[in-house]
Amino acid sequence: MFTLTATEIARICAGRLLCGAQATSTGPAVIDSRQACPGALFAAFSGTSVDGHDYVEAACAAGATVVLITDAERAEELCARVCHQKGNGSSGSDAAALILVTDMQAALWDLAREVRARLDCPVIAITGSSGKTSTKELLVSVLSCTRRTVATYANHNNELGVPLTLLQADARTQALVVELGMRAAGEIAALAALVRPQIGIITSIGLAHVERLGSPEAIAAAKAELLSALPPEGLALYPDDTGYTDLLRAATTSQRALTVGFEPGADYVATEVTIDDQGCASAIVRTPRFTLPVTLQVPGRHLLSDALLVIACAQELGIPDDVTREGLSRAGVVGSRGARLEVPQRQIAIIADTYNANPESMAAALRTLATLQPGQPGGRRVAVLGDMLELGEAAPDAHRGVLDLARELGLEYLFVFGSQFGAAATPEIAYDDMVVLAQTLCCFVQPGDIILVKGSRGMRMERIIEALQNKN
């Protein structure tokens, strides 16, 4: 965060400075006291299970110099505990400042607006039904080769995570990449108004959250809110195969729009696509100016679409092509989004993709599994799939479609878990008890197998991975 005095922060947040007028915040804003560092601003949220006010003293001991609180009844007590601690990174007479605010989230948004107003660097926002995080990570890998880049951490892409991302930026920031999530219409518009990006990227439009929004068209319109928020000189980037090109084009008026894809009509086209035995894709990318050979080190042909968006963005930002290639080639998998885990004691490999699932990402994961070669003779490609949630009336057809695709791809074995898959699948592959499924898999797997484990977050499919990794 930009250097701000406690007095300035209180004014920006419409808060009341209780003590520590000489304190200055020079670090990031955090909501977890364990992440506090010298100069940090600690926002003490009162949650349903954890009250941040209980950790104010710990945050200050770790170096936080400004603390936002909402509990007026505890204000006097907290002031007595923290406002005169010495040696926590403050040069003033008081080591920490305490500021009482009415609404913590509103206070963070106000601070984030102030930081955004001070930024003088490219700001890129990314949204989509799937592919947001992988596109973000590919882009950050490219930008960070030559620029000090701040980006969304993990899945902090909502009304709390986005302002916290902005509050990581400071005067040294040379590029800011923000991921925007969505669960209802209007949310992206609000987040984009806070972020004020010059470049807006839509990675895909699918059925994720269709239960909440009502229809695929409503999802497309919600994603397009990002493009409508771009400034007149802004740039929109999106695939040419979303099925909603006209809607996306209508969302841009004076802004430029560029498309990516695998057909000649796109502005950035991947041609001569090849997949190696690890499932990683290579291609020749034809841009409006020249061609660029690209090789990814992350499994999945679908990631080429994300890479095309990154290449287009990088070229618009003036990133040299050799730097773009280097950044793309060194990008890795994020968390539980397709990471390959080796299990030496069983001599198997697990593709851990348990963060979330929708029909589009499920299809991409299955196609990637189909390209992988087993680790040794006799090894098999096994898919273990959990229900896709929040699909509403589209759920039965969506789950049947995934099962049909798995059969078409010729995967050796398939196991499914949950009521939706259970209604669509044959009884011999369907399970409604996680413990029974885990026990079955532990007895079933054999050396050389590659096991894809994927499902919606609410299905907690990571329990399967934990069972397969257990030596017992």
Image (spheres, rainbow, N blue to C red):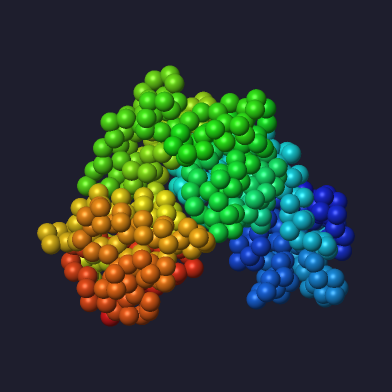
**Residue at the left extreme of this rendering:** 377
Residue 305 position, x and y percent, is 41, 39
Vertical order, 46 against 143 (above or below): below
On screen, residue 284 versus residue 310, left or right, reads left
On screen, residue 231 versus residue 80, left or right, reads left
Residue 61 shows up from this direction: no
Residue 158: quadrant of the picture: bottom right
Q: Nearer the viewer, residue 244 or 360?
A: 244
Q: Residue at x 25, y 62 (%)?
A: 382
Residue 208 shows up from this direction: yes
Q: Residue at x 41, y 58 (%)?
A: 397
Residue 85 position, x and y percent, is 76, 67
Q: Residue at x 60, y 40 (%)?
A: 224
What count of labels does the image hold? 0
Q: Residue at x 51, y 54 (%)?
A: 208
Vertical order, 392 against 260 (above or below): below
Residue 128 position, x and y percent, is 52, 46
On screen, residue 55 versus residue 313, left or right, reads right
Q: Nearer the viewer, residue 258 or 112?
A: 258
Residue 293: quadrant of the picture: top left
**Residue at the top extreme of this rendering:** 289
Vertical order, 221 against 351 (above or below): above
Quarter placement of the C terminus = bottom left
Residue 388 position, x and y percent, is 44, 62
